[in-house]
Each structure stands twice: as C-alpha cells, then as structure tokens.
C-alpha cells in the first residue's frame, strides 16, 4: 500500500535525518510519463525501486539541454546560451558583470566557470566532508580523454559529446570539469573525478565511501542513446540494466546502510509538448539570458525522482514540487552548508517529512 503525502505534508522546518552519505545518480532525457508511467520500459526503476523507497512525482529538471542541468545540480548556476547548447567548444565562461548578483548568479555566457563561482565540492571540502564523482567509461580511449578528470584542452572543440566505439563517456554529463577551481588543481581533480569502476572498491567500507557521491553512467547506460554504438539496446531498458547492477551494490555498502541516501533522477525530459519545458518552484532564468532555460519554456520538464534510504518508508509517494536546485539545497542542508545560487531562492524547500517518512531504526 503506497503512502501518499500531498502538498500540505511538508514544511521547510522539517528536521532532517542524520544522513552522512549522499549518492546522486543522474540519467538522461526522459519525461515522467515515459519513465514512471504504467507502460514504462524500465520496470525496475518505475516499480521495484519506488516500492522500496519514495517516488517524487513532481520533480522537475531546470532546462534544456543536458549540461545546464548538471551544472545546476552542483552549483545553483542557471543555464546560459553556451551550456544550453552543451558547449560544443570547451571554452571559458565570459562574465558580463564583475561579481555574482544578489541571487548568486554570474552573468555572462560560457562553459568553464571562474574560481569566483563556488560549487558543492568546494563547500564540502571546506566543511571537512569528502566527495567523489564516478564516470562510466571515462578514459577507456585515452585519445579522447584521460581516465581521471576527463576533459579536452581548454578552448578545443568538444569531442566527447557523442559516443565512440569502446568509449561512451560524455564530459557534458560531468559537471565537475566545468569549474576552474577543480580543473586547475590537477591533483585534486584526478583524485575526485574518476572512472566508475573505482566505486566498487570504495563502497567496501564506510571509511573509503565519500560523504557525497555523484554517479554518471555512459551514453548507453544512462538512456541517452536509443541505439548504442556497441550494438546494444539503449533507452530505458539500458537504464534498468545499469540500475540492477549498481543500486544493490550501493544499498549493500556499509556507509549507505548506516546513514545513506540515494537519489535517482533524470537531467531533463524529452522536451516534447508544453510539459516538456515546464518548471516548478518559481524557477528563474539567468538575468540577461537570450532564451528561457527550456528554450520553449521556463524549465526542463517533469522527470520524477526516486529516493532510497533507511529514513524513507517503502512505498512513499510525494506530490510536493522539487527541482534540481531543490536537490542541491537538500544536500547542502544535510551537511549544514550555505545555499549556492538559485538553491537559495525562497520558493524552494528541502526534502522533508514527505520524503523522509520513516523513523530511524
């Protein structure tokens, strides 16, 4: 029996459970109806996992295309014309104002943000917490990108946006290489932005599991490519295959069992129809931006999310509105950090009793 919690069930003052290990896993380009509807081609995601955790039915992406959503998830920065187009050239962000505005936004356009723009990793490290990002396939073809901190040379054309045979990593799904504060410190970036295979050994003990873990599947496993370059079946069936492998591994990890939370969501919807570029939560565009975040609408559409944790009652369904900025705000609240960028907007809430519906055991 599903526990449905509606719009009046959560308040911003709800106390957060003592979570100390957050896992965020981002998939690609699916609308809520396709993913979680009755005819979903991903039954493990659509049925099995919500039955074990919480389904957020009103969770929204913040724009189109991919990259702006990923950057928002870790910095609260809104899409600009370059990130909306997935940065075909790995170019510096060019500010049109000397400092962040009152909403924490840097005006201008470009891809790699200057050191003045803080990201969640900066906050976590300053507060004594650890983080690591795991990228499937990164470095499998060293001619495309290295095995750690994978990106092309600054100012070069982006060569990883499309899958290549044997290497289906895409830098546009790796937000951490779009901040100078990370990529300019090679040792820092190399130790934190690594290939997905490293996750297996890191999950073995709580001491080697980061407080914040970000997981990016490759262009086949994340559902981005319907027909995978290796001849395999992509789309939602590929998503289910990936999740059936990695979710049980995360759930069995000592850190997750003790005080973990796993959030699985999509970067953006398929963009179809009015709902495909819809938004929630008073989302704003970057001041001076040429286009709305969703090009034809204010956001990235309704995508939904699943939350797994011992602090979540199995079968919970929340109809409260959330988006990527709200997820960032929730992570920051969990670790006692200030809210970055649009994660600080007053119309946002952190996940509350509508999600964390189980008493600690």
Image: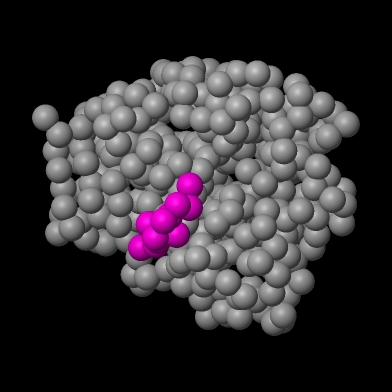
Q: Nearer the viewer, residue 220 or 227?
A: 227
Is 338 left, or right, of 313 in this rendering? right
From this viewpoint, is residue 323 visible? no
Measured as percent of width and height from the top left, residue 272 is found at 45, 52
What coloring was used for the rendering?
A: one colour
Residue 291 drawn in magenta: no
Q: Residue 221 in the image: x percent, y percent?
A: 56, 27
Residue ID at (32%, 36%):
36
Q: Is residue 327 visible?
A: yes
Residue at x 83% of width, y 34% of height: 144
**Which of the 4 image quadrants contains residue 222?**
top right
Q: Quadrant of residue 108?
A: bottom right
The residue under the point 61% across, 75% down is 289
On the rendered image, what quadrant is the C terminus found in?
top left
Could you tell whether 2 is left or right of 26 in the image?
Answer: left
Which range of residues does the magenta coloring cover?
270-280
Magenta stretch, overall SS: loop
């Amino acid at each position: 029996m599903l526990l449905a919690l509606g719009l009046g069930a959560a308040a911003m003052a709800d106390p957060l459970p003592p979570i100390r290990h957050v896992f965020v896993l981002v998939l690609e380009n699916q609308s809520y109806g396709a993913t979680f509807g009755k005819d979903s081609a991903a039954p493990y995601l659509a049925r099995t996992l919500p039955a074990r955790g919480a389904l957020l039915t009103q969770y929204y992406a913040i724009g189109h295309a991919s990259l702006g959503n990923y950057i928002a998830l870790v910095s609260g920065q809104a899409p600009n014309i370059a990130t909306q187009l997935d940065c075909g050239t790995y170019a510096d962000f060019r500010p049109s104002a000397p400092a962040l505005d009152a909403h924490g936004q840097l005006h201008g356009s470009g891809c790699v943000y200057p050191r003045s723009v803080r990201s969640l990793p900066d906050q976590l490290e300053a507060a004594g917490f650890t983080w690591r990002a795991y990228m499937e396939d990164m470095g499998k073809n060293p001619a495309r990108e290295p095995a750690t901190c994978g990106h092309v040379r600054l100012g070069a054309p982006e060569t990883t946006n499309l899958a290549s045979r044997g290497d289906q990593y895409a830098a546009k799904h790796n937000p951490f290489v779009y901040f100078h504060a990370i990529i300019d410190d090679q040792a820092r970036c190399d130790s934190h932005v690594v290939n997905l295979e490293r996750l297996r050994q890191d999950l073995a003990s709580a001491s080697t599991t980061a407080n914040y873990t970000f997981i990016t599947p490759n262009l086949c496993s994340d559902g981005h490519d319907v027909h995978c370059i290796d001849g395999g079946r992509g789309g939602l069936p590929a998503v289910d295959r990936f999740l059936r492998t990695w979710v049980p591994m995360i759930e069995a990890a000592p850190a997750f069992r003790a005080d973990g939370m796993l959030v699985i969501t999509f970067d953006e919807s398929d963009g179809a129809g009015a709902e495909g570029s819809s938004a929630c939560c008073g989302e704003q565009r970057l001041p001076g931006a040429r286009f709305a975040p969703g090009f034809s609408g204010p956001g990235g559409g309704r995508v939904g999310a699943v939350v797994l944790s011992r602090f979540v009652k199995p079968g919970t369904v929340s109809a409260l509105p959330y988006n990527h900025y709200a997820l960032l705000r929730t992570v920051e609240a969990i670790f006692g950090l200030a809210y970055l960028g649009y994660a600080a907007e007053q119309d946002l809430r952190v996940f509350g009793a509508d999600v964390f519906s189980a008493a600690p055991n």
